[in-house]
Amino acid sequence: MRVFVTGGTGFIGSRLVQSLLRDGRRVTALVRSAAGASALERAGAVAAQGDITDADSVLRSMEAAEVVYHVAAHYEIGTSDPAAMRAVNVEGTRNVLEAALRSGVPNVVYCGTVATLGPNTNGPGDESQRNDGLFRSHYETTKCEAHEVALEYASKGLPVRIAMPSAVYGPGDRSLIGLTCRLFVRGWVRFYAFPNATLTFTHVDDTAAGLRLVAERGRAGESYILAGEILTFRDWMGLMSRLTGRRTPRLVGPDKLIRQLMPLFAPLARLAGLPPRVTTEGLAMAGRWAFTSAKAERELGWRPRSAEVGFAETLESFGRAKS
């Protein structure tokens, strides 16, 4: 089977490519850099030079594909270049799906996100939830637009299925979640805030497995949430404390005061190598992002691992989890 993958050198996409290659799939992955091409070729994939913002390179590279996985995205909380993010997340998605439509690809999976749905107040959200329109980050905004692009192409007859992972984590994670894990195992996380803020954590390997199940068992035009375990920040800090043997960080608050002071932490973000706006967007996103994967479990047979198992592996990869 010929498979075409965008984002094949990224956090999720690299796991997907490895999984496909292990099962004997013939994988072509779109890459922008020589280093990325070399890594893919060593793994056994065909590296096609191109960029999802270049429609011609996408169409040329997708030739003869039987399955397309569009995983590439610009993920960053606090981006300093919203236009570049939109070019990748929105226009890049349009380029990939247009190429798939023109090429007559019979099976397309678009990797979206539960950020498209926004936070919730009553109960874990499912695929029927709708965003409240109060966009908390440029990432949320652009992925909402990209989701609409996917639905537009579904209405045109493209057999696209939409996967919607929640907060993805795991070994090699370079996001804010991964940074928190790295700092935690070093004993540098001494304080935390917003104890009732909530995330639904999904291991990166479970996400890659879910993408494959969406392609193999999902229905065209349907969306499938890939959501692991729901944890409040208090639960998450306690879990990492148990797994590492580190003291549980001290809670600071109240929440209202922290929200007022957060803009003052921009210089600290710069010192950590993060965009200064991460404090503003991160603050806005400190809410309840709780989701259920009941549909994916029922229709696809997807089964995520527990946070206990997933974070034990993740923290150990950063060097300090207890055996």
Image: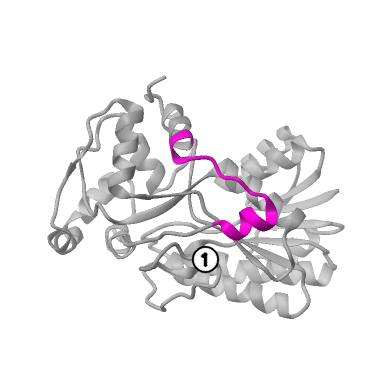
Q: Is residue 228 visible?
A: yes
Q: Is residue 314 above or below residue 203?
A: above
| Residue for point 42% across, 65% down | 81
Whether residue 225 can be seen here: no
On screen, residue 145 above or below 288: below
Closer-to-camera residue (142/200): 200
Position of 134 relative to 124 (above/below): below
Q: What are the residue bounds of the magenta stretch? A: 293-309
Q: Which residue is mark 1?
A: 126
Within 10 angstroms of label 1, few (less than 14), some, or many (20 or more) residues?
Answer: many
Compare residues 215 and 196 and report the one nearer the observer.
Answer: 196
27 relative position to 205: left or right: right
Q: Is residue 136 above or below residue 5?
A: below
Front residue (pair 50, 248) = 248
The C terminus: image quadrant = top left
Q: Given the image, on which type of amino acid does mark 1 rest? A: Asp
